[in-house]
Every structure is written in C-alpha cells, then in structure tokens.
Image (cartoon, grey):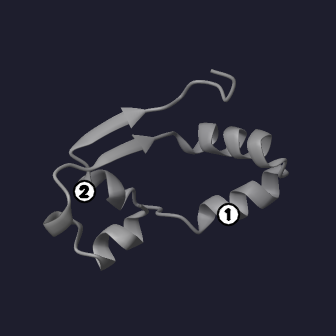
Amino acid sequence: MNYTSLIKYKYKKNTNRILVINVSKNTQIKKTMLRDNYNYYQTKNIISTQDKNNKHLNLADDIIKNEKSIDN
C-alpha cells in the first residue's frame, strides 16, 4: 500500500505494523531505468512526483534498506 492509501484508509486501525522498504534516490533511478527500460529523464520525472519528504518513513515501524542491484 502506498503512503497516500495508508493515510486515506486510517492505517493504524487496520494494521499491527508497517514495513517500509527504502532505497536511495540514486538506486531508485538506476533500478527503474533497468526494470522499465526508461531513460534518465523519464525516470526522474516519475520519481519527482513521489513522496519528496520521506513522510512514509515516519509511519514505519520497521525499515529495510534495499541498495542491492536488481540482479540480487
């Protein structure tokens, strides 16, 4: 579930814990370009519409950092 949905549906009433899998912007750009075959500018455009302030991290009970390559 994305951040907006969590807020909209009052997540605390329906969940025990929230797990966020987080990645740096640079890794997110690289993985998106590889996975979706987008160029750098398309990818930056898509990412720029997402949560800029990392508010979703404030909701998390647990956070996993995912910096490994897309092949792993």
Quadrant where the C terminus sits is top right
Q: Residue at x 38, y 72 (%)?
A: 5
Task: Check disc 1 and report its element: helix, strand or loop.
Answer: helix
The x and y percentages for residue 69 are: 64, 25
Counting residues from the N terminus, which is met first, the one under dot 2 or under dot 1? 1
* Crowd class of label 2 (few under 14; some 14 to 19; many from 20; radius 10 Å): some
Q: Residue at x 84, y 47 (%)?
A: 37
Q: Quadrant of residue 12?
A: bottom left
Quadrant where the N terminus sits is bottom left
The x and y percentages for residue 16 are: 16, 52
For residue 64, above or below residue 61: above
Closer to the camera in the image, 68 or 52:
68
The x and y percentages for residue 41 are: 80, 57
Q: Residue at x 80, y 50 (%)?
A: 40
Q: Are marks 2 and 1 in contact (CB under 8 Å)?
A: no
For residue 70, above or below residue 18: above
20 lies left or right of 10: right
Q: Disc 2 marks which amino acid?
A: Leu
Residue under numbered circle 1: 46
Closer to the camera in the image, 8 or 38:
8
* Crowd class of label 1 (few under 14; some 14 to 19; many from 20; radius 10 Å): few
Residue under numbered circle 2: 59
